[in-house]
Image (tube, grey):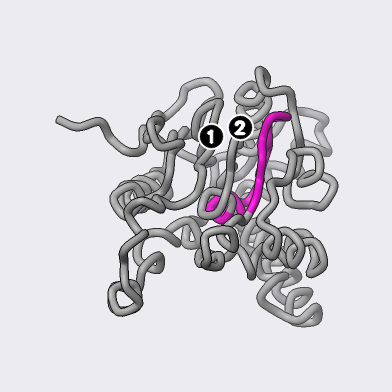
Amino acid sequence: MSEPLVRVEKLTQPAKVALITFNRPKVMNALNDALAEELAEQLAALDADPDVHVIVVTGNEKAFAAGADIAAMAEWTYAKVYNDNYITKHWEAAKSVRKPLIAAVSGYALGGGCEFAMMCDVIIAADNAKFGQPEISIGTIPGMGGTQRLPRAVGKAKAMEWCLTGRFVTAQEAEAAGLVARVVPADKLMEEVMATAGKIASFSLPAVMKVKETINAAFETTLAQGLTFERREFHATFALADQKEGMRAFVEKRKPDFKNQ
């Protein structure tokens, strides 16, 4: 049997964390339809798994994902990509995942690789990471959110310059611009990512998912609508057993024992 295009591991240390690894090393983890389909299936399964609270996605030391598979697309026609609704099916499965997604980026995250990382909730980058939307250099434009999510992350000026020049952006510049949450030494990347994932996984899952949902709403609503949504979700936490446990533990100066209820 052929190797899976994405490898999945449910970890015991840290607990409640799953690791997805892109597995096309010969082509720098270039994304294609088959990989996207496998990834969508695995994300859906892990999102539904009560034993998984946080999902980490990574590639290898050389590349998180160096874009889409250009060799596969080179001779496609407009009719094909339009009729197939290319990218929409499977490729955007990350958008519907309710649990936190952390992108652990080492090496190249270009084109679709950068766009997929932006679909995740947190990007932690190795100090050797390179980000970019170089589609302009091959006569096309970003098609998986590069012109939409990038301005929301780094602002119009930087997004415009990055997409129009196609230049590669260092991890340090990406962090300064707001694209990346943290930059860590390459040899410490997974250690740091797992520490972050483990910390998040230790909290109440309903509360964690509410944080993700409310922050994402900030990009889809006006400030007034977003504040109302946040307030209602805050009120809703008072229906959770975990809210009672968390606040009682704080008052009693002990560690909370969350039951994710």
Q: Are marks 1 and 2 in contact (CB under 8 Å)?
A: yes
Residue matched to label 1 = 63
Residue depicted at x 66% and y 26%: 195
Instruction: Tell me, yes or no, if residue 257 can be seen here.
Output: yes
Q: Which residues are magenta?
A: 115-132
For mark 2, give the secondary structure. Answer: loop
Instruction: Tell me, yes or no, if residue 100 can be seen here.
Output: no
The answer to which image quadrant residue 128 occupies is: top right
Judged from this view, the residue extending furthest toward the left is 1
Residue type at the position of mark 2: Ser
Q: Which mark is residue 106?
A: 2
- Along the viewing direction, whichever of 21 and 82 lies nearer the viewer: 82
Q: Quadrant of the N terminus?
A: top left
Drawn side of residue 100 relative to residue 250, left or right: left
Residue depicted at x 37% and y 47%: 39
- Residue 73 image position (x, y, % from top left): 35, 59
Queried whether the magenta region covers residue 121, the answer comes back as yes
Residue type at the position of mark 1: Ala
- Residue 99 image position (x, y, % from top left): 53, 50
Drawn side of residue 50 relative to residue 198, left or right: left
The answer to which image quadrant residue 258 occupies is: top right
> Dot 2 surroundings within 10 Å: few (below 14), some, or many (20 or more)?
many
Residue depicted at x 79% and y 44%: 175
- Residue 221 image position (x, y, % from top left): 70, 79
Mark 1 or 2, nearer chain start: 1
